[in-house]
Amino acid sequence: MSSTELPSVPPTSVLPEAAAVRVAEGERLRSVGLPGVTLSIRSRPPVREGLPPALFVHGLGGSSQNWSQLMEQLEGAVDGEAVDLPGFGDSPPPDDGDYSVTGHARAVIRYLDASGRGPVHLFGNSLGGAVATRVAAVRPDLVRTLTLVSPALPELRVQRTAVPTVLLGLPGVAGLLTRTTGKWTAEQRVRGVLALCYGDPGRVTPEAFEHAVEELERRLRLPYFWDAMARSARGIVNAYTLGGQHGLWRQAERVLAPTLLIYGRRDQLVGYRMAQKAARSFRCSRLLSLPDAGHVAMMEYPEAVAGAFRELLAVAVESGDQPAARSVGGGPAAPGAGS
């Protein structure tokens, strides 16, 4: 095998058993077999019958656990489920090895079609934001509202702090990282991730830090961990280069669902300057700017994110149509956001 190739991954049927994934109190975890992919679904039983369904999609390197706090905040508003994308969390790799944005979107669509839960209130963070945008554009029948937290949409000038993530998608880099960081402890790796993703890592409780270390230790033992990371990072880079009707910004313009955009001013991975472009691109958008948040606002400020979504939901229900574009709770309305 050349130095530029990714390590081979055993078929799903012969993968070793990993330690159990943590399930918080009040949550359930189940596995759903679909054509070409098996997905792990995290859910909270609805507090009452008849709540509208919601689906949460995590970002690169994340899992359905990233949404646990927000799901708890919204358990009286939606019937929430969070998916582990193929190769992440407790979901094994896809049979075809496709980790592109389109591949991840296809997995989400297959689940929504098979479950019959659509249209859903669809949430996405980072990579999951790009995936959710594509789902909403190509299958508007499956999406009732769209909530994007620091979505990974193309930027001409990538932030310097995001360069290592971009480089991860280049051939050979994943193997180089495994060799050069082989002696790093899980605690060191988690501290680095928190420093990159949180506006204030000090907000992470000791218990949450311990859980994050346990989860990373579990995932580092999986033979496909770096493969899934590298190929998904490459998928983001490839999606950034697509033009025409398949370009993510062009697809954002096609989204019909009322859209809530959430950006943190301390985000080191998705430039805050992209908030205004996003507000102009999504035809029916609301923008929440959080001055102290980083890349994972739903984990740092779940109450604020939940409040903004409840407002979106209330307006959508009251009007029975798409709410007018405006800014909520964090900054001036974006000029032309409703165009």
Image (spheres, helix red, strand yellow):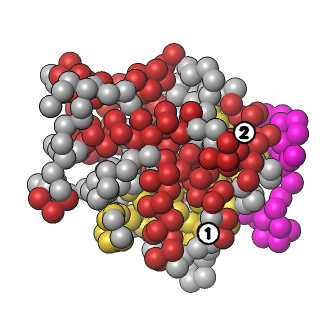
The verdict on residue 122 being magenta is no
Amino acid at dot 1? Leu
Label 2: how many Cα within 10 Å (few below 14, some 14–19, many 20+): many
Q: Quadrant of residue 40?
A: bottom left
Disc 1: which residue: 142
Q: Nearer the viewer, residue 102 or 225?
A: 102
Residue bounds of the magenta highlight:
313-339
Left or right: residue 77 versus residue 269 is right
User: Dividing the image into 4 quarters, which one contains the N terminus?
Assistant: top left
Q: Nearer the viewer, residue 289 or 200?
A: 289
x, y percentage for residue 312?
74, 58
Mark sitting on residue 278 = 2
Amino acid at dot 2? Ala
Q: Nearer the viewer, residue 185 or 2?
A: 2
Q: Residue at x 70, y 44 (%)?
A: 250
Q: Residue at x 56, y 34 (%)?
A: 240
- In the rendered view, tell whether residue 78 sits above or below residue 270: below
Q: Quadrant of residue 217?
A: top left
Q: Main secondary structure of the magenta part?
A: loop
x, y percentage for residue 179?
17, 22
x, y percentage for residue 265?
64, 27
- In the rendered view, tell whether residue 146 sits above or below residue 320: above
Left or right: residue 132 versus residue 178 is right
Which residue of the protein is positioned furthest toward the top in this rendering? 160
- Secondary element at tag 2: helix
Q: Residue at x 73, y 60 (%)?
A: 257
CA–CA distance in space, label 2 to label 1: 21 Å
x, y percentage for residue 261?
69, 45
Q: Residue at x 78, y 70 (%)?
A: 317
